[in-house]
């Protein structure tokens, strides 16, 4: 049974309610910060990711921000920014940015639900999993470019490729 079948009888589902239901289903630690905002922690292969999702009624967008600490040396910031440009060229659903004041690498994505559209659990699950997947894929490249002193081009070669199909 698809996750969305649980909600077919409801006419009004708040997007953050959908996120909360998914967090419970995946047994992720979460905290409902407000009616329109939720924060959760998800353990990845390389590190833990802090995810915040909030619903903006004004622009009808479910916003996802996924962060993790990176702490690059100041001397390698140019390499990090060049690497981020290369990474973002390969990403179609969201983008990375660096928040220097907080020392955080950030993945941002917005799911537009204009005209009263409802976010399905499958859409939200895909959105969260994409954020985690892309972070896991490019984290080793970020480490190599900042701490391993590899060139951004060389660091990109170690990015874990996306797999398609089945084995």
Image: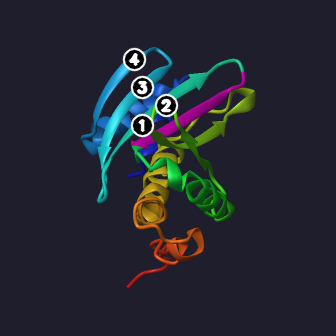
> Residue at the location (46% across, 67% down)?
149
Upstream in the sequence, badge 1 or badge 3? Answer: 3
> Residue at the location (46% across, 46% down)?
128
Along the viewing direction, whichever of 68 and 73 lies nearer the viewer: 73
Examine the rendered structure and indicate whether residue 71 appears above or below residue 162: above
Examine the rendered structure and indicate whether residue 151 appears above or below residue 108: below
Disc number lying in front (1 or 3): 1
Are the two marked residues, 3 and 4, in contact with CB atoms closer than 8 angstroms? yes
State the residue position of label 1: 51
Q: What element does badge 3 sit on?
A: strand
Cα distance, mark 3 to mark 4?
Answer: 5 Å
The answer to whether 166 appears left or right of 80 in the picture is left
State the residue position of label 3: 38
Place of residue 106 in the rendered image (x, y in percent of width and height, measured from the top left) = 51, 42
State the residue position of label 4: 33
Cα distance, mark 1 to mark 3?
Answer: 8 Å
């Amino acid at each position: 049974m698809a996750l969305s079948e649980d909600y077919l009888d409801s006419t009004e589902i708040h997007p953050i309610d959908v996120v909360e239901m998914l967090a419970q289903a995946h047994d992720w630690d979460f905290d409902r910060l407000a009616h329109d905002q939720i924060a959760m922690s998800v353990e990845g292969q390389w590190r833990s990711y802090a995810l915040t999702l909030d619903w903006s009624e004004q622009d009808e967008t479910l916003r996802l921000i996924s962060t993790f600490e990176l702490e690059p040396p100041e001397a390698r910031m140019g390499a990090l920014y060049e690497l981020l440009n290369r990474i973002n060229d390969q990403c179609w659903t969201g983008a990375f940015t660096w928040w220097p004041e907080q020392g955080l690498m950030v993945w941002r994505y917005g799911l537009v639900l204009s005209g009263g559209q409802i976010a399905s659990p499958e859409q939200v699950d895909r959105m969260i999993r994409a954020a985690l997947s892309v972070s896991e894929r490019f984290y080793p490249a970020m480490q190599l470019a900042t701490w391993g002193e590899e060139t951004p081009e060389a660091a990109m070669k170690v990015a874990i490729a996306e797999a398609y199909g089945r084995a």
